[in-house]
Amino acid sequence: MWKKTEEKEEKEEKEGSLLKELCGDDTKLYNFLSICLYLNPLAAISKKDLDILIEEAEKSGNFRPAMDKAIFESAQNTGKRERYIKVIQNLASKTMHATEQEKEKIEKEGHTDQAASLGRKIENYKFMSERAEDIINVAFKFYNEILVELGESARREERGKERRGAEWEERRIEELEKAERGARKKERSGMGRKEKRVSKKQDKREELAAEERKEARGEERKEGEREERRIGELEKAGREARKKERGGN
């Protein structure tokens, strides 16, 4: 449990560093995107079509799923950037209008703390409308990097499952071989002298063959470890190359 928590914190810190790199000295943009972008967009963002999400938002007044989808899709469809800028600005405008109406109602009821919170949301939506192009530009680079690393992580997990499966199979084989040796030893207790000699020779051959198979599995395991290190080095080189392309230090 602790390990998973540490891994999550490390990942969040890493992605926070990526976002800071992309935003540079633009603190307002960083602060906004740090609560707007997702570390795992494939899991967090709706699979529904954007048009459907917009229709649902018009009925429910909750535009966040549609906004998230629009920003994520804009990162995947650079040729349609102008369209997505307009979509985001439109969604921000509608959300801002709905929030302003809610704020007025809350203020009349005397809930000043809630009204202040809604006021900050209105400022965020205003910022989104004004800086839609900058948001899309950063989201493009952020999500592309995230998706590459999510793919690498998924492949590492799959390789880990294969390794654990191979280790389990190796233990199973060793237990079977041990059981077979024990069974043969038990059988020899009722044999004559000549039969025992033949059985012991056969046992020796079986043990040598088992040792050879064990050594072969060990070499396969070492080769797998070498391949894992090679893949890790390639992934690291890829991350550094992409960072250089982004203009990072």
Image: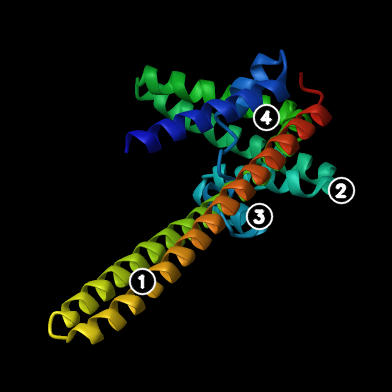
User: Which quadrant holds the N terminus?
Assistant: top left
**216 or 211, nearer to the observer:** 211
Q: Residue at x 43, y 63 (%)?
A: 211
User: Which quadrant holds the C terminus?
Assistant: top right
Q: Earlier in the sequence, mark 4 or mark 2?
A: 2
Q: Which is closer to the viewer, label 2 or label 3?
A: 2
Q: Give the alpha-carbon distance from disc 4 to disc 3, as whole Å.
A: 18 Å
Q: Residue at x 65, y 41 (%)?
A: 91
Q: Residue at x 53, y 50 (%)?
A: 43
The three-letter code of the residue at mark 3 reads Leu
Q: Earlier in the sequence, mark 3 or mark 1?
A: 3
Give the structural element (helix, strand or loop) at label 1: helix
Q: Earlier in the sequence, mark 2 or mark 1?
A: 2
Give the structural element (helix, strand or loop) at label 4: helix
Residue at the extreme right: 79
Marker disc for residue 50: 3
Q: Residues within 10 Å of mark 1 (few under 14, many from 20)?
A: few
Q: Which residue is mark 1?
A: 204
The three-letter code of the residue at mark 2 reads Gly
Q: Which residue is mark 4?
A: 128
Q: Which residue is mark 2?
A: 79
The three-letter code of the residue at mark 4 reads Met
The three-letter code of the residue at mark 1 reads Lys
Residue at the extreme left: 190
